[in-house]
Image (cartoon, grey):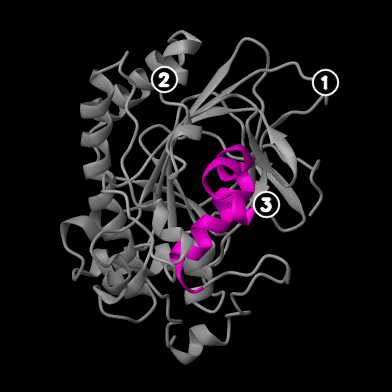
Amino acid sequence: MGNNQHKPDALLPVIDFGNFLVDPTSPGGQACAQALREACHNPGFCYLANHGIDARLEQDVIDISHRFFDLPVSDRLAIKNTKSAQFRGYTQLGMEITNNTQDWRDQIDFGPEKETVNLGPDDPQWLKLHGPNQWPPALPAMQDIISSWLGCMASLGTSVLSALAVGLGQEPDYFDYMAGDEPEFLMKVIRYPHVENDQDSEQGVGLHQDSGLITLILQNEVPGLEVGLGDDIVPVKQIPGTYIMNLGEMLQMATHGYLRATKHRVIMPPPGLERISLAYFVNPALEANIVPISLPPDLMTQAPGGENPNPDDPVFSVYGANKLKFRVRSHPDVAAIHYSDLV
């Protein structure tokens, strides 16, 4: 994959999800499930249209995101992520790492509101990922707006998983076992500004695969997302009214590689522009142990295997172990405080 090769636009499929939402058993719903499966098999990225999320709510989420990043630095740092063993809260510009290189973005991370866990001597470290969010005191409206959007996205994520299950020849509720008591969703509110830096780097976030099941991305009109297709990395434009959807390593592993976790990155916008991206990650429960699917024979012949070929970066079957691996690697400052024995 040539990191600096570009084409004018990524020709990603647009999936009309409305028929599945209205009636998954209808011919249109079944056809949608098949189209979604094919898109997630290759290229592993698509646009999701007619998804049922209110456009006014989406604009409210974009607007409140801008308002947060316009706050004084001291107000943003009031919820700095180093205060959280759950890696929640505000990550300062340049304080995240991908491929051992500094990412030029800042962001807030949110997840399920839970009580913290007091670990016993034999408990896995990833149980510490259970815990509360940090909400900015200087922007009290943010919690209600974000929480409303999260509720809608949880429902959409469940429907997408059901459609993929149907497309893979399973019952619609096949993936329900992964949810446990509560799925460990993750939301990132991300800003990509233009930054002059000593490394002369345009890396907003470096080339990577996501770690969970499904990612749904709402972005403003400023470009920057690029997707690996074949030997090229191609830009993905915004299509108003759609979400960009891609898959994570856990779903790739669960389907023997039939569904593809495609590598992608974000490059820095030009001077004077600011990219806002809202990423909702549909994940299993931390405790979920992912079992590979028994695919229909015709699909299994197209499944290359779901393991990461890099032996130093295994994909763990228990989602909590997989998530903690990613978080420690991406946020070494948080890990040094809360997971010092893993650093």
Residue 142 x %, y % = 28, 23
Quote the CA–CA distance across marks 2 and 1.
28 Å
Label whose residue precedes the other's in the sequence (3 or 2): 2
Inter-mark Cα distance, 3 to 2: 37 Å
Mark 2 crowd level (few <14, some 14–19, many ≥20, 10 Å Cα): some
Element under label 3?
A: strand
Coordinates of residue 34 in the picture (x, y in percent): 38, 69
Q: Is residue 294 left or right of residue 331?
A: left
Say left or right for 101 vs 154: right
On the question of residue 227 being in view, the answer is no
Pinpoint residue 206: horizontal percent, then vertical percent: 68, 42
Which residue position is annotated with label 1? 198
Tell me the SS state at disc 2: loop
User: How many numbered marks have been drawn onto this rendered protein structure?
Assistant: 3
Query: Does 11 appear above or below 291?
Result: above
Check disc 3: other Cα within 10 Å, few if <14, some if 14-19, many if 20+.
many
The three-letter amino acid code for the residue at tag 3 is: Gly
Q: Is residue 182 above or below residue 288?
A: above
- Kind of residue at badge 1: Asp
Quarter of the figure that contains the N terminus: bottom right
Q: Which region is colored magenta?
A: 317-343
Amino acid type of disc 2? Ala
The residue sitting at 36% across, 68% down in the picture is 287
The residue tagged 3 is 228
Q: Is residue 13 magenta?
A: no
Who is closer to the viewer here, 154 or 301?
Answer: 154
Numbered badge on residue 78: 2
